[in-house]
Amino acid sequence: MAPEDAWVSTEFVVAVPHPNPLASCHLVVAPRRHVAAFYDLDVQEQRMIWDALSELRQRIATSINVTGFDAGFVDAPVGDEADFHAYMHLIPRIHGGSVSLPRDAEWVDLGPQP
């Protein structure tokens, strides 16, 4: 991905389009710091991820008709590769659409559009 492809790029987080999107505006949101699990981040870094998700939800909801959002946390399995980098999926739920959420993530329903 080129830097100009990023939807969000801050000191703490970057959000880019998923290379194989399951829905329009499917994004990958990742911390800048290399960690294997979301809860390896400090509280400020976690907060910046949540802030980015909030901003992205608003931006997406103004560009397409969504009924809600799913966020999927992808962490390294215990004992897995040492260089794994935790990240999140952000997938908008589009009225009339159906997405089979990947099993590699722990999913959270972020509710209806903001």
Image: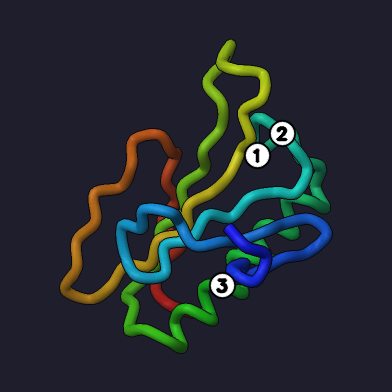
Residue 93: give x, y in percent of width and height: 31, 67
Residue drawn where x is 79% and y is 55% of the image: 12
What amino acid is at disc 2?
Val
Residue drawn where x is 42% and y is 62% of the image: 26
Q: Which residue is mark 3?
A: 56
Please name whichever residue, 112 or 103, is drawn nearer the observer in this view of the structure: 103
The quarter of the picture where residue 86 lies is top right
Residue 91: give x, y in percent of width and height: 40, 61
In-image side of 74 versus 48 (left or right)? left
The quarter of the picture where residue 9 lies is bottom right
Say whether disc 2 or disc 3 marks the residue closer to the N-terminus: 2
Residue 38 numbered tag:
1
Residue drawn where x is 59% and y is 65% of the image: 53
Asked if 39 appears above or below 14 in the picture, the reply is above
Residue 35 numbered tag:
2
Q: Are marks 2 and 1 in contact (CB under 8 Å)?
A: yes
Please name whichever residue, 3 or 59, is drawn nearer the observer in this view of the structure: 3
Q: Give the Cα separation between the discs numbered 2 and 1.
A: 7 Å
Asked if 101 appears above or below 109 in the picture, the reply is above
Q: As drawn, which residue projects farthest toward the left?
A: 96
